[in-house]
Amino acid sequence: MRDNDKYFMNLALEEAKKSCEMGEIPIGAVIVSGDNIIARCHNLTEMLCDPTAHAEMQAITTATSFLGGKYLQSCTIYVTIEPCPMCASALYWAQIGKVVYGAKDEKRGYSVISDKLMHPKTEVVSGVLENECAEIMRKFFKKLR
């Protein structure tokens, strides 16, 4: 695991904490081009009343707007939880260069459905700050119950 991966995943965790404070499921995402952050986002599904307002979807929109194009081949997304099939498909269409995620989503993660949801050229790295990413989710759902 590269130090950069830990650094950017910590920033994604900061975004997850923001969404938790808003009553949103605590998932954060950061998109990096080179070593430059071009998107920092978190879940907004409750606030926007939009089931598609996942952290990754927000980050894709922000990053493509910043770059002025729909492809993210030279970019890396850091996301605290494994992308769901909707987000994995959006990352496919954006042709993201690399996906780095923290904790697996055993119920709704893209690998549960099909590892073919990612673009064939996309590199996928899992388990970066896995315990920290899983813990924020555990605490959030424990509070709800």
Image: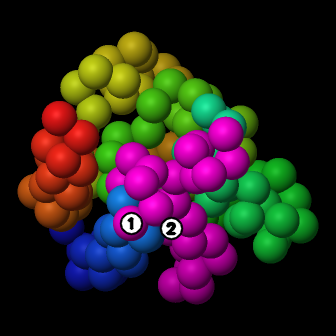
Q: Amino acid at mark 2?
A: Val
User: Is label 2 or label 1 in front?
Assistant: 1
Which residues, given as a range, are shown in magenta?
Answer: 21-49
Give the amino acid at mark 1.
Glu
Which residue is drawn at the image coordinates 56% and 65% (left, top)? 41
Residue plotted at (71% across, 65% down) = 63
Q: Secondary structure at mark 1?
A: helix
Q: Nearer the viewer, residue 62 or 76?
A: 62
Q: Point out residue 71 in the picture as x, y percentages from the top left corner.
A: 77, 52
Q: Which residue is mark 1?
A: 21
Question: Which residue is identified by label 2?
Answer: 30
Q: Residue furthest bottom?
A: 36
- Viewer-nearest residue: 91 or 26: 26
Indicate left or right for 63 with 17 as reference. Answer: right
Horizontal and vertical percent position of residue 81: 33, 47
Q: Is residue 77 one of those drawn in magenta?
A: no
Q: Is residue 98 visible?
A: no
Does residue 24 appear in this view? Answer: yes
